[in-house]
Amino acid sequence: MSFELSPENRARVASIAARYPRPRAALLPVLRIVQEELGWISPEAETWAAGLLGLAPVEVREVATFYSLLRRKKPGRYVIQVCRNLSCTLRGAPDLLAHLRDRWDLRPGETSGDGRFSLLAVECLGCCHESPCVIVDDLEHVGVTRERLDEILGGLP
């Protein structure tokens, strides 16, 4: 299976790679663009990025496995991130995770059987003052309760 980015994203990658005197320095932004387009970093995309930047495939794998923001398996249609840092934990994140397990049959690191949702328990999302915080795809929700979480997920197409 081969991998190729859209023409628009190939242009973005070329522009980014040109900014760095050391190709390895462009790896993280390149992988972020790949993930924007695919939703994850496939093994083929890792090989592609290695070839593009003149790196060994293992160097790309090291970066892809180190950063939790880079996904190495295909996510569901909607990616749910629940902050589990201290402020969110103290203000109800464990209850939200339990609710997602009990009501929606979702556990951190898993994708629902229908492929609709993937759940990630993540570190700080930067909303400590309005915790607990949940991000669904790129939309941030603060002060989330069980009821609000049901509204958010139930309102998705």
Image (cartoon, helix red, strand yellow):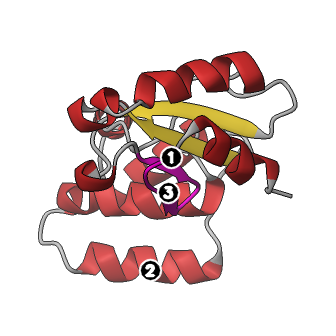
The residue stretch that appears in magenta:
133-144
Quadrant of residue 37 within the rendered picture: bottom right
Residue where numbered disc 3 is placed: 141
Q: Is residue 93 left or right of residue 1?
A: left
Disc 1 is placed on an element classified as loop
Whether residue 11 is visible, yes or no, is: yes
Percent position of residue 79, x then y:
61, 45
On-image quarter of the C terminus:
bottom right
Mark 2 near mark 1, Cβ–Cβ under 8 Å?
no
Residue where numbered disc 1 is placed: 144
C-alpha separation, residue under disc 1 versus residue under disc 3: 7 Å
Amino acid type indicated by mark 1: Val
Residue where numbered disc 2 is placed: 12
Q: Within 10 Å of the Cα at label 1, are there few (<14), some (14-19), or many (20+) other Cα atoms?
A: many
Mark 1 near mark 3, Cβ–Cβ under 8 Å?
yes
On-image quarter of the N terminus:
top right
Front one among 70 and 13: 70
Indicate which label's residue lies in the foreground, 1 or 3: 1
Amino acid type indicated by mark 3: His
Front one among 80 and 20: 80
- Figure disc tally: 3
Which residue is at 73% across, 50% downward? 151
Indicate which label's residue lies in the foreground, 2 or 1: 1
Q: Earlier in the sequence, mark 2 or mark 3?
A: 2
Whether residue 126 is visible, yes or no, is: no
Q: Earlier in the sequence, mark 2 or mark 1?
A: 2
Front one among 77 and 43: 77
Percent position of residue 115, x then y:
81, 35
Disc 2 is placed on an element classified as helix
Which residue is at 31% across, 76% downward? 16
Indicate which label's residue lies in the foreground, 2 or 3: 3
Q: Within 10 Å of the Cα at label 2, are there few (<14), some (14-19), or many (20+) other Cα atoms?
A: some
